[in-house]
Image (cartoon, rainbow, N blue to C red):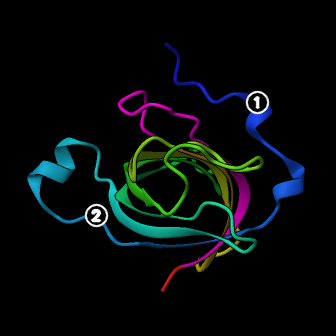
Amino acid sequence: TTYVPDPGSFSAGRLDSAQFDVLFRSPDIDAFKWIASPRPEAGAIISLSGHESVVHLGLNWHVPVGTTPFYLEAGLGLGITDGYLNNAPPGYHNLGCRALLHWEYGVGYNINDRWTLTAEWQHVSSTGLCDPNEGINNLGLTVGYKF
């Protein structure tokens, strides 16, 4: 069994989602320092056309690329979906269960001290714990603002 997303699951015809995330500062506690100081993250991927939406909670790692304005991101957490668990109509995914694993990878650019731009890929699935397990893949650009 592999958990690498199927490239065929991406569809330019489904450019129909908006994403909202809130990232917090990494807590100044030893447990977070021990795992490379991730930032707690809460977010949602909302389908604007009635397809699957997801809310998620997790941890996000942000790694600068040397002294450049570029950075790498990775996130891991749990998501809850409103999608079909099975017997989905054409164009929808059979997700198997409501609670799913959510992970993301990105490459970003610090435009200035406040604004960022990140190209990212996100995947939400049961990683084989539920059957069926078609999962949801998202590619996109995220504009960020630091308060």
Q: Nearer the viewer, mark 2 or mark 1?
A: 1
Amino acid tagged 2: Ser
Tag 1 residue:
7
Q: Write down the residue under mark 2.
A: 26
In front of the other: 87 or 37 = 87
Left or right: residue 135 versus residue 56 is right
Label 2, residues with CA under 10 Å away: few <14, some 14-19, many ≥20 = some
Q: Is residue 132 magenta?
A: yes
Q: Which residues are magenta?
A: 125-145
Secondary structure type for disc 2: loop
Instruction: Pinpoint residue 140: horizontal percent, then vertical percent.
Output: 73, 57
Q: Nearer the viewer, residue 114 or 136?
A: 136
Residue 146 image point, x, y percent: 52, 80
Residue positioned most to the left = 30
Of the pair 75 and 54, the residue shown nearer to us: 54
**Residue 47, quarter of the rendered image:** bottom right
Queried whether the magenta region covers residue 118, the answer comes back as: no
Sequence-wise, the earlier of marks 2 and 1 is 1
Query: Of residues 115 and 54, which is closer to you in this image?
Result: 54
